[in-house]
Image (spheres, helix red, strand yellow):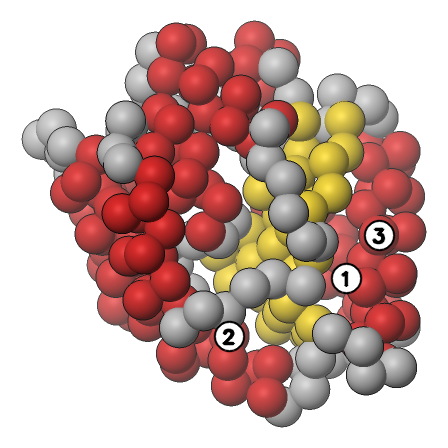
């Protein structure tokens, strides 16, 4: 069982990479489950609709609890059962997003958010977290080129998104790997696959 998370700021290519990784795994006959945050279950999708598209402003603490609600539900009902069944789980965002957006971006207290997140996840930690690094301006340009309709968080100002990016760039810990996502799509995919193969090989040998 292997739990892989793809993280990064807006326009970094997270969702595209998750889809590519899922296709690669499936092409090799490996069972894989993909989830997105917030989302992945009816409860989590309802929380997503509120946190990203609610017409009124939400405070960072209010965002936090919606994200944690979604995370707790998808961990309990989707991620843990899939891992216990021996499947690979690919997640488009996980707990590092909370530390980047609600803590670094929104100013919530680090230690308290860490404790709240641990309660939501039951202490679940990804085997690999791929952090895609892309400058704010390039990320915004990619979204404009794709004609993406921005959600409430994406519409935050550049100062907010620079704080988010800085949090990602300084993220460290077991299994955290940084990839320069300003490179070509193929270079990013190749780099990601090398890291994925390393962690799945360890998992196959029973090394945690």
Badge 1 density bin: few <14, some 14–19, many ≥20, Cα 10 Å: some
Comes first in the chain, label 1 or label 2 = 1
Q: What is the C-alpha distance between the residues marked 2 and 3?
A: 21 Å
Contact flag, marks 2 and 3 (Cβ < 8 Å): no
Q: What is the C-alpha distance between the residues marked 3 and 1?
A: 16 Å
Residue 86: percent from left, percent from top: 69, 86
Relative to 116, is 5 on the left or the right?
right
Residue under pointer 1: 23
Residue 96: percent from left, percent from top: 49, 45
Residue under pointer 3: 195
Q: Is residue 63 above or below residue 150?
A: below
Between residue 151 and residue 157, name the one nearer to us: 157
Give the quarter of the figure containing the N terminus. bottom right
Comes first in the chain, label 3 or label 1 = 1
Task: Give me the residue at 59% from left, 36% from top.
Answer: 171
- Residue lying furthest bottom: 85
* Residue 102 sits in quarter: top left
Q: Is residue 65 above or below residue 44?
A: above
Dot 1 lies on which element? helix
**Labels in figure, total:** 3
Relative to 72, is 190 on the left or the right?
right
Can residue 151 be seen here? The reply is no
Task: Give me the residue at 19% from left, 47% from top.
Answer: 50
Residue under pointer 2: 79
Relative to 62, is 133 on the left or the right?
right
Task: Give me the residue at 37% from left, 62% from top.
Answer: 118
Q: Nearer the viewer, mark 1 or mark 2?
A: 2
Q: Which mark is residue 73?
A: none
């Amino acid at each position: 069982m292997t739990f892989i998370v793809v993280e990064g700021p807006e326009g970094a290519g997270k969702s595209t990479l998750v889809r590519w990784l899922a296709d690669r795994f499936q092409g090799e006959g490996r069972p894989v489950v993909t989830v997105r945050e917030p989302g992945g279950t009816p409860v989590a999708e309802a929380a997503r609709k509120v946190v990203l598209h609610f017409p009124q402003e939400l405070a960072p603490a209010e965002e936090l609890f919606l994200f944690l609600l979604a995370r707790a539900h998808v961990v309990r009902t989707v991620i843990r059962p899939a891992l216990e069944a021996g499947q690979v789980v690919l997640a488009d965002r996980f707990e590092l997003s909370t530390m980047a957006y609600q803590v670094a971006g929104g100013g919530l207290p680090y230690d308290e958010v860490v404790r709240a997140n641990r309660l939501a996840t039951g202490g679940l930690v990804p085997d690999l977290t791929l952090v895609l690094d892309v400058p704010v301006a390039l990320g915004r340009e990619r979204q404009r080129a794709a004609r993406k309709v921005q959600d409430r968080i994406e519409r935050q100002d550049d100062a907010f998104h620079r704080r988010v990016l800085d949090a990602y760039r300084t993220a460290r810990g077991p299994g955290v790997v940084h990839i320069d996502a300003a490179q070509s799509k193929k270079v990013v995919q190749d780099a990601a696959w090398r890291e994925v193969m390393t962690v799945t090989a360890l998992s196959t040998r029973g090394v945690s």
